[in-house]
Amino acid sequence: MQKLLSFIEEFYFWKNLSLVIIFFILTPITLGIALFTLISFSRVSEVEQTVFQKTPNSLQSPTWGARVYASLPSKIPSIDGEAIAQDAREELIRQYLSKYSSPLEPYSSFIVQEADKYKLDFRLTTAIAQQESNLCKKIPPGSYNCWGWGIHSRGSLGFDSFEHGIEEVSKGLRENYLNDGLATIEDIMTRYTPFSDGSWSFAVNQFMSDLQ
């Protein structure tokens, strides 16, 4: 009987000792894993805040450069624009035109230059060209008119070159639309294509959004 009691006592001694050893081994490991997980989640949260941080709307505050990719709202408040620093606008236009194999690609810089000259959103003439002519791939031969500009019963207005067309359309949008208070794509549609059911402004807005 005495031997049995000694065996039981020894068994519980080693059992308790094993549990204590396991506790002191696993506890630091568990705490370390928990701390590492908390630090990882904290870093992910910081990255998400950086990526999704709200930036000024590109049409309301056109500060081109680091914020050139600001999101476009569902309703365009204004299509005025102003360049105040070197930015990536020319490359955005060039890449977009290249993607669709547009003959306007060599004129990316000129498109932005004329937009600045007449204080337009730099995406506007390209978006209209996409809507009106699939970026100049469907135009009357030799017309250089990618914008459906000057359409009348006798035909469409023609330009001497793509540069001439870009300049005249940019100037016309400023003088005949924006200066008359037509400050949104929807407003422009009422004069540019008055019989549209709204699909014209919807498409132009979408193309402008694609150019961000």
Image: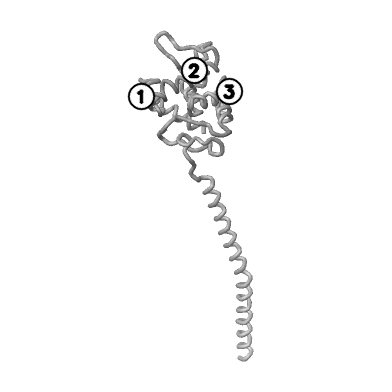
Front of the two marks 3 and 2 = 2
Q: Which residue lies at the image location 62% right of the left edge and 72% below the top edge?
A: 24
In the rendering, which numbered label is found on residue 197?
Answer: 1
Instruction: Depth check: give the residue in front, 25 or 153.
Output: 153
Q: Which residue lies at the image location 55% right of the left edge and 14% below the top edge?
A: 161
Residue 61 seen in render: yes
Q: Which residue is mark 2?
A: 168
Residue 108 rendering spot, x and y as whole percentages: 57, 24
Q: Secondary structure at mark 2?
A: helix
Instruction: Depth check: give the residue in front, 117 or 51.
Output: 117
Q: How is the image coloured?
A: one colour
Q: Quadrant of residue 111?
A: top right
Query: From mark 1 to mark 3, how far is it between C-alphas?
Result: 31 Å
- What quarter of the picture does the N terminus occupy? bottom right
In the rendering, which numbered label is found on residue 105?
Answer: 3
Q: Which residue lies at the image location 60% right of the left edge and 69% below the top edge?
A: 27
Residue 101 seen in render: no
- Mark found first going from the N terminus, 3 or 2: 3
Query: From mark 1 to mark 2, how far is it between C-alphas?
Result: 26 Å
